[in-house]
Image (spheres, helix red, strand yellow):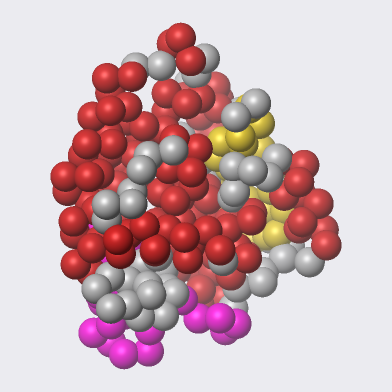
Amino acid sequence: MITLYTMERDYPYGTLRSTNGCKTKVVLEEKSIDYQVVGVRPGDVWKKVPEVLAKHPLGKVPWIDDGDLTVYDSTVINEYLNEKSDHAPLLPQDVALRAKARALENYADEGVLSKFLPMIWMPWWSPEEQRDQEAMQKGREGLAREIFPFLEEALNGQEYLCGAFSLADVPMMSMAMVLEVDGMDTASFTNVHGYFARLRSRPSYQAISPSNSCADTVHLLNKR
């Protein structure tokens, strides 16, 4: 069984999870791979403690243990999982579409998960009075200015970024999760708004839904 190491914490307003850890959770769910989750304390990640660095040299989550093998970096992990199991392939067969999926996944990682989303997401891990509301608003404005117009065009006439659900859509599941907590209004971006609704309706989203506590998701996993 694969062990996923990631950050998850219950709050009164929902369960917050590592956006990159959620990417891997979604792939494990989509491909019906047996796994268990081990929580990593946020402080241990932020302080880069030796135990974390021993598993991920950049001191980040997620990483997975698959027997004696440790794999880190969510994109690398997800490629590994997709190749490990033939069930529900998450990359297109067509070589051009496969390149497009990888490029869009990279766009999401660098343009969303590493740029604008942390400005919104990281303050939610702190008490309300300590949140940088100005930074959070800048993050929302960045999404509305740069990311959503790009996605509107990319999604035109398609349910998912490459037609069928693929690795390109996986990091967008994390954005859908964050914005569910944040409550940002996306209705003026018709394609994006519908896209988020489709992502949240996928069964795999239940593993990262802020409505499901850490205990809830373990229960759901045990029922599979």
Q: How many marks?
A: 0
Q: Residue at x 62, y 36 (%)?
A: 15
Q: Is residue 88 among what the camera can see?
A: yes
Residue situated in front as seen by the camera: 16 or 13:
13
Q: Is residue 33 left or right of residue 6?
A: right
Q: Is residue 93 magenta?
A: yes
Looking at the image, which residue sits at the far top? 129
Say which quadrant the C terminus sits in: bottom right
Q: Is residue 127 above or below residue 76?
A: above
Q: Residue at x 25, y 44 (%)?
A: 143
| Depth order, front residue of 104/139 | 139
Residue 124 location, x and y as percent? 47, 26
Q: Quadrant of the N terminus?
A: bottom right
Measuring from the top left, give residue 135's x and y in whole percent. 28, 23
Q: Quadrant of residue 11?
A: top right
| Numbered range of the magenta stretch | 86-107
Q: Is residue 182 left or right of residue 204?
A: left
Judge from the rendering whether residue 144 lies leftward or rightward of residue 93; answer left or right.
left
Which sits in the foreground, 163 or 31? Answer: 163
Residue at the image position 55 percent from the left and 40 percent from the top: 17
| Picture layout, residue 58 above or below residue 25 | above
What percent of the width, then of the height, locates residue 170?
Answer: 44, 62
Q: Position of residue 98 (x, y in %)?
A: 31, 80
Report the residue that reaches farthest toward the bottom: 94
Query: In which quarter of the view is residue 184 placed?
Result: top left
Q: Is residue 70 visible?
A: no
Q: Is residue 161 left or right of residue 61?
A: left
